[in-house]
């Protein structure tokens, strides 16, 4: 596997190569994930930006197959991302395991509460990388959800732009964006990194070429 060129050109250096080792277990996971990615023909970045906290988005998300590839990439980079799931999922015998795996339980019926829950999680963790798919669904959608941007703004953290491209079988880190609060302007800039990316299901690939509404007042 070789470095993704876009990571170098987008100002991600200086970076640890990869994230620091967390012990023997993380080194074994890194080796296994690297083997899987190599055998499956995927090229992934070897650099991870030196950030303790960030929202990391990956697009285009069009298939369940994205999951194993992205999890393997995270394992190879020694990154343990947090992820959002229904609060009901952790109210089970497997709740403790899900939390250990990085689950942040949220009540999706109360939109404003999700933003506050995520912001509080960032505040209480010394290190936290939150992984999100900006489309919010694998199906074709006319525009991205604003949640990832609102969460980054509320928590005061940057946004790492991850690109998964099935045409080139490459996962790359395109850039690190610091949100300005101007959603429309920032989104145009963010989505420019995804214009040429092709998802596993190309007919469902959409980088939101429509108009971008302003953020709600409670963002």
Image (cartoon, helix red, strand yellow):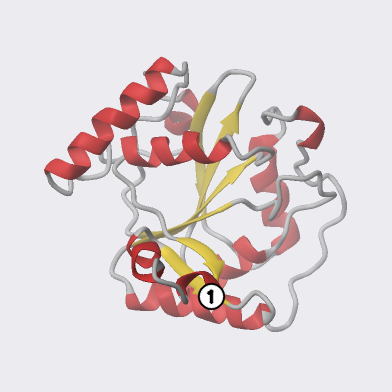
Q: Give the tally of numbered discs.
A: 1
Provide the secondary structure element on which disc 1 rests: helix
Q: Which residue sits at x=61%, y=51%?
A: 133
Residue under circle 1?
A: 87
Q: Which residue sits at x=60%, y=64%?
A: 180
Q: Nearer the viewer, residue 212 or 55?
A: 55
**Image quarter in which the C terminus is found:** bottom right
Q: Which residue sits at x=34%, y=63%?
A: 97
> Eyeballing the image, is 56 above or below 37?
below
* Image quadrant where residue 33 sits: top left
* Image quadrant where residue 206 sits: top right
Q: Nearer the viewer, residue 80 or 65?
A: 65
> Is 36 on the left-hand or right-hand side of 219?
left
Q: Nearer the viewer, residue 13 or 51?
A: 51
Label 1 environment density (alpha carbons within 10 Å; few <14, some 14–19, many ≥20): some
Residue 55, how many percent across, how many down?
A: 49, 58
């Amino acid at each position: 596997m070789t470095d993704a060129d876009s990571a170098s050109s987008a100002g991600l250096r200086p970076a640890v190569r990869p994230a620091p080792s967390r012990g023997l277990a993380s080194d074994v996971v890194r080796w296994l994930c690297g083997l899987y990615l190599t055998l499956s023909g995927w090229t992934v970045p070897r650099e991870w930006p030196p950030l303790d906290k960030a929202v990391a988005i990956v697009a285009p998300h069009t298939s369940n197959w994205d999951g194993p590839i992205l999890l393997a990439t995270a394992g190879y980079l020694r990154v343990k991302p947090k992820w959002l799931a229904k609060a009901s999922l952790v109210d089970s015998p497997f709740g403790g395991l899900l939390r250990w795996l990085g689950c942040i339980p949220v009540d999706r019926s109360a939109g404003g509460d999700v933003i506050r829950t995520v912001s509080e999680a960032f505040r209480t963790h010394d290190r936290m990388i939150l992984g999100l798919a900006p489309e919010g669904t694998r199906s074709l959608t006319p525009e991205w959800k604003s949640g990832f941007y609102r969460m980054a703004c509320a928590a005061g953290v940057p946004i790492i732009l991850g690109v998964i491209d099935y045409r080139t079988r490459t996962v790359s880190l395109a850039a690190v964006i610091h949100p300005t609060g101007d959603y429309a302007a920032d989104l145009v800039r963010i989505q420019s990194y995804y214009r040429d990316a092709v998802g596993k299901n190309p007919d469902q690939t959409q980088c939101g070429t429509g108009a971008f509404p302003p953020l709600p007042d409670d963002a």
